[in-house]
Amino acid sequence: MLKYSVSLDLVFHALADPTRRTLVERLTRGPASVTELAEPLHMTMSAVMQHLAVLETSGLVRTEKCGRVRTCSIERAPLKKAEEWISKRRAGWERRLDRLGNYLAEHTRDEEKS
Amino acid sequence: MLKYSVSLDLVFHALADPTRRTLVERLTRGPASVTELAEPLHMTMSAVMQHLAVLETSGLVRTEKCGRVRTCSIERAPLKKAEEWISKRRAGWERRLDRLGNYLAEHTRDEEKS
């Protein structure tokens, strides 16, 4: 459960980078240590930590330190909120197209009758 | 139909700003001129044009000039691609939770038997 409200600005900003999307994708398959996350990325640990900091600030990723190991996991709420924002816009757009389609269909029938 | 491939970097970057999301939201209700889009925003026309340029670069918005009026409309593909990217990650995450739930349920039954 998130203790703060999700900022769509921060979530979309976090997702606007291919490395950060790769990290999110990896973490949807299960929690991982920072070392595990860094391994396939071919970049400095400092760069990986910076990307993780952006993801953590957005709320998409939660990190917990246990001894010397920092484990990262995904948070559901921000991803869900971003998805819902887009879905609602797309649904609104499609309703408009449906109405336009119906109008054109009726208009065509009226034209054929006259 | 888009003549170029959708860049998720550009789409998510475009959506990471509340004014640009307001513009997208307005355009899902139908095409609008730049003047109509600017009216409720209480910012300079130059600022609105900059936001529209970011949306146009991302592919989310298409603008067409007819005489002195520039009309903006929404493009479906980039919004759909962003939604699909998030949906797939969320689905992967939920499948993992289901598997974890099943494992825990089986483990609990085994514990009860022994």
Image: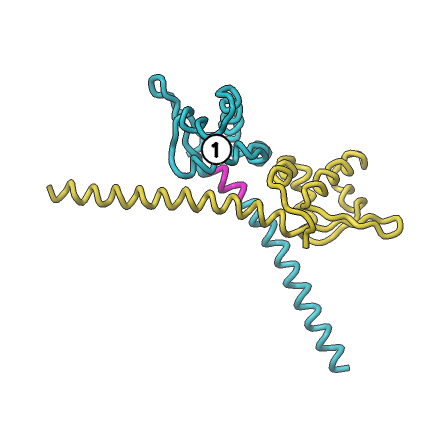
Chain colours: A cyan, B yellow
Q: Amino acid at mark 1?
A: Leu
Q: Is residue A33 above or below residue B19?
A: above
Residue A101 position within the rendered picture, expressed as x and y whole percent measured from the top left = 67, 66
Residue B52 position within the rendered picture, expressed as x and y whole percent measured from the top left = 74, 40
Residue denoted by label 1: A23
Corner quadrant of residue B23: top right
Q: Is residue B68 left or right of residue A93?
A: right
Depth check, front residue: A54 or B112? A54
Local SS, label 1: helix
Q: Any magenta on residue A80?
A: yes
Residue A24 position within the rendered picture, expressed as x and y whole percent measured from the top left = 48, 35
Q: Is residue A6 left or right of residue B76?
A: left
Q: Which residues are magenta?
A: A77-83
Q: Chain of mark 1?
A: A
Residue that appears at 77% across and 34% down: B47
Q: Any magenta on residue B10?
A: no
Question: For the residue carrying disc 1, how many other residues have a C-alpha within 10 Å: few (<14), some (14-19), or many (20+)?
Answer: many
> Across the whole image, how many numbered discs are drawn on residues?
1
Residue that appears at 51% across and 19% down: A46
Question: How would you classify the magenta stretch by its main secondary structure?
Answer: helix
Q: Farthest residue in the top direction?
A: A68
Depth check, front residue: A78 or B78? B78
Q: Is residue A1 left or right of residue B34?
A: left
Residue that appears at 47% across and 38% down: A25
Q: Farthest residue in the bottom direction?
A: A113
Quadrant where the C terminus of chain B is found in the figure: top left
Q: Is residue A107 above or below residue B75?
A: below
Corner quadrant of residue B13: top right
